[in-house]
Image: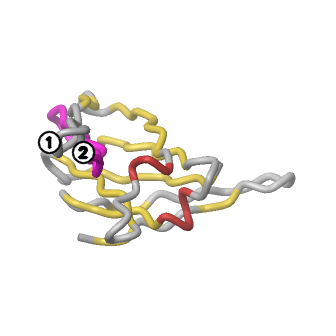
C-alpha cells in the first residue's frame, strides 16, 4: 500500500506526470482537502481492471458503507472524484483498490 502523490494545477501550464499504482493505495486527507481531488487511472494492460474507492462510512445501524467497483477497459483510462467523505477519520486517508495493478498508472490532481 502506497500513498499516492498529488499535483496542484496553478494558473500556469502544469505538467502532471503519471506513476505506478499497486492493488491498494491511499490518498491523504490533505491532498483531498475540502474541494476533493481527481484521480485518473490509466490502464496500459491488455485486460480490463476494476477500481474501487472505499467508503469508510457506516449506516445508521452500523453497517459498513458500500463501495461499487468501476471498470477501466484495457488500454483506456477513467477519471474518479475523491471527496472528503472518502477519507477514513481514524486513518486520515482514502483507500483506492484495483483488481490488478499490472501496467496501471495514475495522475492525481488536487481540486
Q: Nearer the viewer, residue 110 or 46?
A: 110
Q: Which of 32 and 65 is in front in this view?
A: 65
Point out the stretch of residues depicted in magenta: 45-57
For the view shown, which residue lies furthest in the right direction?
11
Please say if 109 is above or below 5: above
Q: Residue at x 18, y 53 (%)?
A: 102
Circle 1/circle 2 CB separation < 8 Å? yes
In the rendered picture of this protein, how many numbered marks are placed on residues?
2
Q: Which of 99 and 26 is in front in this view?
A: 26
Residue placed under numbered mark 2 in the picture: 58
Labels 1 and 2: the sequence-earlier one: 2
Q: Which residue is drawn at 34% across and 63% down?
A: 26
Q: Count residues near mark 2 (Cα–Cα under 10 Å), then give few for <14, some for 14-19, many for 20+.
A: few
Classify the position of the N terminus by image quarter: bottom left
Query: Along the horizontal axis of the image, is 20 left or right of 29?
Result: left
Let me know if residue 38 is in the magenta part. no
Percent across and percent down for residue 91 are: 33, 71
Percent across and percent down for residue 53 are: 30, 44
Let me know if residue 52 is in the magenta part. yes
* Kind of element beneath mark 2: loop
Q: Residue at x 45, y 35 (%)?
A: 79
Percent across and percent down for residue 22 are: 23, 61
Residue placed under numbered mark 1 in the picture: 63
In whole angstroms, how far apart are the C-alphas of marks 1 and 2?
5 Å
Amino acid at each position: 500500500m502506497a500513498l499516492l502523490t498529488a499535483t496542484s494545477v496553478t494558473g500556469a501550464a502544469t505538467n502532471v506526470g503519471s506513476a505506478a499504482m499497486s492493488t491498494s493505495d491511499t490518498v491523504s486527507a490533505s491532498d483531498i482537502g475540502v474541494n476533493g481531488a481527481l484521480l485518473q487511472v490509466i490502464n496500459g494492460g491488455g485486460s480490463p481492471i476494476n477500481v474501487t474507492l472505499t467508503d469508510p462510512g457506516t449506516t445508521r445501524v452500523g453497517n459498513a458503507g458500500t463501495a461499487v467497483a468501476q471498470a477501466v477497459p484495457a488500454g483506456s483510462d477513467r477519471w474518479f472524484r475523491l471527496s472528503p467523505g472518502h477519507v477514513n477519520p481514524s486513518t486520515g486517508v482514502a483507500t483506492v483498490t484495483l483488481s490488478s495493478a499490472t501496467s496501471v498508472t495514475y495522475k492525481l490532481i488536487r481540486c
